[in-house]
Amino acid sequence: MVFRWKSLLVALILAGLASGCAHPISSSLRDQANPDFSLERIMQRPEHFKGEKVVLGGIIVQTRNYNGWSEVEIIQVPLTWTGRLGDRDESSGRVILRYEGFLEPEIYSKDREVTVGGTVTGVKTGTIDKAEYKYVVVKVEELRLWEKSEYVYYGYPYYGYWGYWGPYYSPAWSYRRGPFYW
């Protein structure tokens, strides 16, 4: 009887770990995606990549709705192996996501993170401030909007009034709200 409970516990832990690391884009779409995807290469020869499947991530700049479809302008950010956004300070440019249907602009709002799988349909010319810009356009097949991040990181290590507090502890963010929290 004890052995079965241990086996069940191990199975549940492994299932939890596996689901926590699951990629937000289906494996079938990821298998079809072009592994050589880079915005620089697409901008050089957009006609060559038209119809290619891609998986990318980004930070929303703006969401616009039209009759029957939506456009989400994102700043492309490299993805980690789990499908989450990597270094937010790295980008190869901007992408316009075309989604069939309505996306609520208050939910798909500025600075939210997305991971998307879709097909490159071409390039669209627009402007950023007063500069002309060519956006890569991707027709969305799968879209994942990530939860808002409330985490504030003050660097590693953090030294404060009470000495060394560890890499994730600061007066602005704490797991506990004890007598030394201010």
Image (spheres, grey):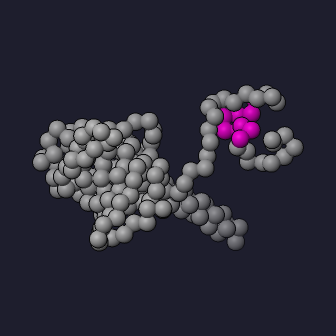
Residue 165 located within the stretch drawn in magenta: yes
Residue drawn at x 63%, y 34% is 154
Asked if 156 appears above or below 31 in the picture, the reply is above
Q: Residue furthest front?
A: 130
- Locate residue 173 relative to residue 147 in the image: left or right: right
Visible residue check, residue 115: no
Quadrant where the image shows the N terminus = bottom right
**In the figure, residue 94 lies in which quadrant?**
top left
Between residues 87 and 68, which one lies in front from this camera angle? 68
Q: Is residue 171 magenta?
A: yes
Q: Is residue 124 left or right of residue 153?
A: left
Q: How many marks?
A: 0
Picture residue at 19% right of the left edge, 56% below the top: 121
Whether residue 148 is visible to the viewer of this picture, yes or no, is: yes
151 over 138 or under it: above or below: above
Q: Main secondary structure of the magenta part?
A: loop
Question: In the image, residue 30 lies at what x, y percent?
Answer: 31, 56
> Which quadrant would residue 144 be assigned to in this image?
bottom left
Can you say which quadrant of the picture contains the C terminus? top right
Which residue is located at x 84 percent, y 40 percent? 180
Image location (x, y in percent) of residue 141: 30, 63
Image position of 20 (left or right of 46) = right
What is the x, y in percent for residue 4?
Answer: 65, 69
Camera-side residue of 3 and 121: 121
The answer to whether 2 is drawn above or below residue 52 in the figure is: below
Residue 31 versus residue 146: which sits nearer the camera?
146
The residue segment tinted magenta is 164-172
The residue at the point 71 percent across, 41 percent down is 172
Q: Residue most toward the right?
A: 179
Percent position of residue 49, x then y: 16, 48
